[in-house]
Image (cartoon, rainbow, N blue to C red):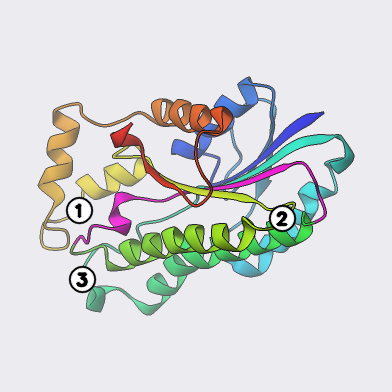
């Protein structure tokens, strides 16, 4: 029997670290991202997750490879995301708002729907883990779209958990705040002009004080939470509080 995991945005940052962690522990790992995941033994599907019309085709292609009769667990990690344009909402171009919402929120909603529907008859363990952010509950001037979409992911998590928890073959659903992690996103934040992001100095200071988590550290924490099965469905966990 095999443990299956699908990771969106698995080619870099937290997604890449998660792909390596699960692959090293004998999971069959699929990454869906614009770029190929460089980790050995990870199956890469290249695609743009900001285009929701492609999501069902990506997941269907995975199901064509996997023998569901030999699966013991199937996990979906919704990791792909973007800050979008940094700056007050009126400075965000319409196409940037639309693309960021599609990637950060519409995509996870659709992927969750497809995952649940296509595996509804399966009796093995099924889980959806979303990588959310403390920005879901703390507003940052200049991140209106990012904060809003992450808040949406949190409510998606709670609502799907309510829908699924009474079902015989229901899906367990959680979201995780990884903390401030040294990724390309953090580099983008630190390079933002203060006129667009007034909190930029806070993130520069975190870097200079070496207070950022590494993607590997975050991946280890998420893997342990997942495998130890300590979270109730619907729970949203901040790794900084563990």
Q: Which residue is mark 2?
A: 58
Q: Residue at x 20, y 53 (%)?
A: 192
Looking at the image, do the residues carrying marks 3 and 2 touch, with CB atoms under 8 Å apart?
A: no
- Using the image, determine if residue 199 lies above or below residue 20: below
Q: Residue at x 75, y 60 (%)?
A: 57
In space, the residues marked 2 and 1 are separated at their CA atoms by: 34 Å
* Residue 133 badge: none
Q: Residues within 10 Å of mark 2 (few under 14, many from 20)?
A: some
Q: Is residue 182 visible?
A: no
Q: Residues within 10 Å of mark 1 (few under 14, many from 20)?
A: some
- Say which quadrant the N terminus sits in: top right
Determine whether, in the image, residue 156 is placed left or right of residue 85: right
- Using the image, determine if residue 187 lies above or below residue 234: above
> Does label 3 or label 2 sit earlier along the sequence?
2
> Does label 3 or label 1 sit earlier along the sequence?
3
The question of residue 124 being in magenta is answered with: yes
The region drawn magenta spans: 121-140
* Residue 59 in picture, x, y percent from top left: 73, 54
Q: Which residue is mark 1?
A: 192
Q: Which residue is mark 3?
A: 88
* Residue 119 in picture, x, y percent from top left: 77, 54
Q: Residues within 10 Å of mark 3 (few under 14, many from 20)?
A: some
Quarter-of-image position of residue 42: top right
In space, the residues marked 3 and 1 are separated at their CA atoms by: 13 Å
């Amino acid at each position: 029997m095999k443990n299956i995991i699908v990771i969106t945005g698995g080619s870099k940052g937290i997604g890449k670290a998660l792909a390596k962690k699960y692959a090293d522990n004998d999971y069959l790992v699929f990454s869906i991202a614009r770029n190929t995941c460089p980790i050995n033994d990870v199956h890469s599907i290249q695609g743009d997750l900001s285009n929701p019309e492609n999501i069902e085709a990506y997941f269907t292609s995975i199901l064509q490879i996997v023998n569901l009769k030999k699966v013991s667990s199937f996990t979906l990690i919704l990791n792909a995301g973007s800050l979008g344009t940094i700056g007050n909402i009126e400075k965000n171009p319409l196409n940037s708002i639309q693309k960021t919402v599609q990637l950060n929120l519409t995509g996870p909603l659709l992927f969750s729907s497809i995952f649940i529907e296509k595996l509804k008859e399966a009796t093995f363990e099924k889980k959806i883990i979303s990588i959310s952010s403390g920005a879901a509950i703390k507003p940052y001037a200049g991140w209106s779209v990012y904060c809003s979409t992450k808040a949406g992911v949190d409510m998606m998590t709670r609502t799907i958990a309510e829908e699924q928890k009474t079902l015989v073959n229901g899906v367990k659903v959680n979201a995780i705040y990884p903390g401030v992690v040294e990724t390309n996103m953090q580099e983008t934040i630190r390079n933002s002009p203060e006129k667009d992001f007034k909190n930029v100095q806070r993130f520069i200071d975190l870097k200079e004080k070496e207070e950022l988590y590494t993607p590997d550290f975050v991946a280890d924490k998420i893997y342990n939470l997942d495998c130890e099965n300590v979270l109730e469905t619907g729970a949203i966990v901040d790794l900084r509080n563990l």
